[in-house]
Image: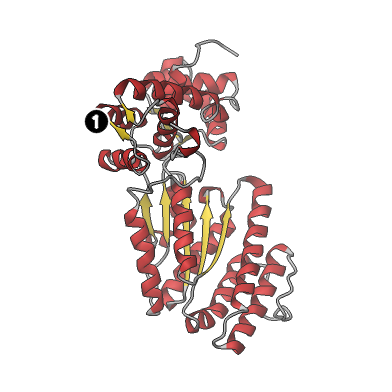
Amino acid sequence: MLHELNPFRPGAGVRPPELVGRQAEIDLVDLMVAKSRARRNDGGLITYGLRGVGKTVLLNELHRNVDQAGWVTVQFEARPGAAGKLVSRQSLARGVAMAGRKMARFRTAVADVRAAVSTVSSFALTVAGVSVNLGVEPSDHRANSGLIEVDLEELVADLAEPLQKNHSALAIFVDEMQDLDGDLLTALLAVQHKATQADWPFYVIGAGLPTLRRTLAEARSYSERFALHEVGALSPSSATEAVIRPAEQLGARFSSEAVAAIVDEAQGYPFFLQTYGKAVWDLTPDRHIDLEIARAGIAEGNADLDQGFFPARWDRTTPSERQYLRTIVAVGGEVASTAAIADHLHVAPASLSPARQSLIEKGIIYAERRGYVSFTVPNMDRFIRRQPDIED
């Protein structure tokens, strides 16, 4: 079959040809839009899960849906560290400025809109030093305290009425939300909480790794009032649909044994389904995909993953960190207790803390439960088993 017709698209944040298994989150945000029109706010949405499960794809889909519904949106990806803190604030400020430009075109409650846009200018200037020409002077008494939580609340308060009068809302979309600095995360949670109480048309919709649940709880106790959804592996039926429907639309068909082999190898993770699907398609000589072709495609897909996806994490580790990762696999597979790791290596648990913390900071493992560590990437244990057991 022609390679240029290949419907499968592995890639970070790339929408697959069939977005399946995520209807609950899509329906929830559609309900937010409907309730917002009735001036009712039941809170935002935060999703969490391992890498490769399609969180960014889902976030982009939700963003696209509310944008089509007429909402004003801000979208950015959080980054860790001091540099990440600055970038996040600049991204937020510039996004708010763009939202102000969109609001400036509103035709209802023009005077209210003009005052709100003045607050937008003040917020952008105060939070990140971003000066924008929105046709009005920055407010000299709103969103200019220099305290991110205070300024964000004043911004949302001033935007609420003109947004409602124009049947719109403000939504801030944050990817990699676990990397937000504490002050900005707390501000977003606090203002979402206030917006829910006051029925302001403001929503925080975020996505992050499984550690995000604990990060949210530590930031503010009322973060539990968000809708928290785990985005995990697809069910067998949804995974099967993700494989066969794109092919069928182009006249190709998988045998039941072939699709079962792909779904089993991918363990329901969307990124791997796309990787194997692409490899199988490129190897298929005709429109019938049998088990033999599927197995060849799986092998080709694993070779591709071993060249790019997994080494992006593995190559950033030190020899001692790789020993720690190998031990996770040896004693637990995908999840292991820190005590078992130390026992296997015949060392005191405290001596492994530097390697553990470094791997957490690099985003390769996470510690959601006390005393246990897990891989942030599905099937990382399989990749490690395929690596030669030699010291670097």
Q: Secondary structure at mark 1?
A: helix
In the image, is 60 to the left or to the right of 93?
left
Q: Is residue 350 visible?
A: no
Question: Residue 179, relative to residue 302: is it above or below?
Answer: below
Image vertical order of residue 304 relative to residue 268, above or below: above
The residue carrying mark 1 is 256
User: Who is closer to the viewer here, 377 or 168?
Assistant: 168
Quadrant housing the C terminus: top right
Extreme residue toward the top, this view: 390
As drawn, 5 above or below 21? above
Q: Answer left or right for 390 relative to 240.
A: right
Report x, y in % for residue 331.
37, 20
Viewer-side residue, 129 vs 184: 129
Residue 322 can be seen in this image: yes
* Residue 238: percent from left, percent from top: 29, 43
In the image, what residue occupies the spot 37% across and 28% down? Answer: 286
343 lies above or below 148: above
Residue type, numbered disc 1: Ser
Q: Is residue 360 left or right of residue 130?
A: left
